[in-house]
Image (cartoon, grey):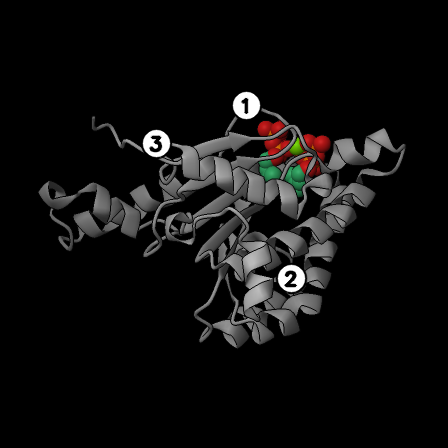
Amino acid sequence: MNSSESSSVNANIDPANLPSHIAIIMDGNGRWAKKRILNRIEGHKKGSDAVRLIVRTCREIGISILTLYAFSTENWQRPKTEVTALMSLLKNFLKSEQKEMLDNNIRLNVIGQIEKLPEDVQQVLHKTMTLTKENNGLMLNLALSYGGRAEIVRMVREIATKTKKGEIDPDLITPELVSDFLYTKGMPDPDLLIRTSGEMRISNFLLWQIAYTEIFVTETLWPDFSKQEFLQILKHYQRRERRFGKV
Ligand code: IPE
Ligand code: IPE
Ligand code: MG
């Protein structure tokens, strides 16, 4: 990126106070389609364009980790046709983005029950993660078949098993140790959580990790989410005073 491109991107944003880790609940694809009397799947298709745009923007401004809630453990309960369409969109998205990820030093990572995804989707995911594993620019962290409670249950089981075997001393279980048994091991907690489409809820996303995350909810439906609005939210974030319980 040349300097004029980077300064236009960074307009009014303080590069020294960027969130390291941004998490997004990409909600509103169905409502976007409904407003246009389209099938919900059309909303998901349009939503994948917004994903591309936001990934690109995060890469340009130098965000370290972008965690996108793409499919929750509860989303399996949607109609089979919608689940199938989402899986196929995901597969196509990964295939079409491989080159961009390689060209732009983006590393793909997945959090969630990857083993529950269809075999062909798992294959593309593993392939893309392997191809991009040496990249050290933006980490694109996709939450797939992800649920915060399921993640916590998995952590408790693993710690309990190790404790039973005598590998972990119960007195030495700390918040840091717990974090090491989550999918997000080694990642800083999100600094900023954005939810599109106006719902004031967490919907089982990153329950442990968002203890001190700044939350921003916008009414904009995910397929309409723009680079401009994203940068505006970053500006708002920079005006927040993060206190972490202190004075
Ligand atoms: C978010 O959009 C995408 C997924 C959950 C996969 P929705 O499909 O939840 O859209 P709304 O909430 O029905 O508008
Ligand atoms: C959250 O959106 C999950 C994802 C964005 C993948 P939902 O649409 O599933 O959440 P609820 O049902 O509004 O809580
Ligand atoms: Mg929704």
Ligand 2 position by quadrant: top right
Residue 170 in sight here:
yes
Q: Secondary structure at mark 1?
A: loop
Lower sequence index among marks 1 and 2: 2
Q: Secondary structure at mark 3?
A: loop
- Residue at image point 78% right, 41% down: 43
Q: Amino acid at mark 3?
A: Glu
Which mark, residue 121?
2
* CB contact under 8 Å: marks 1 and 2: no
Lower sequence index among marks 1 and 3: 1
Which picture quadrant has residue 123? bottom right
Q: Is mark 2 within 8 Å of ligand 1?
A: no
Quadrant of the frame with the C terminus: top left
Residue placed under numbered mark 1 in the picture: 200
Q: Position of residue 68 (x, y in %)?
A: 55, 48
Q: Secondary structure at mark 2?
A: helix
Query: Mark 1, mark 2: which one is toward the viewer?
Result: 1
Residue placed under numbered mark 3 in the picture: 241
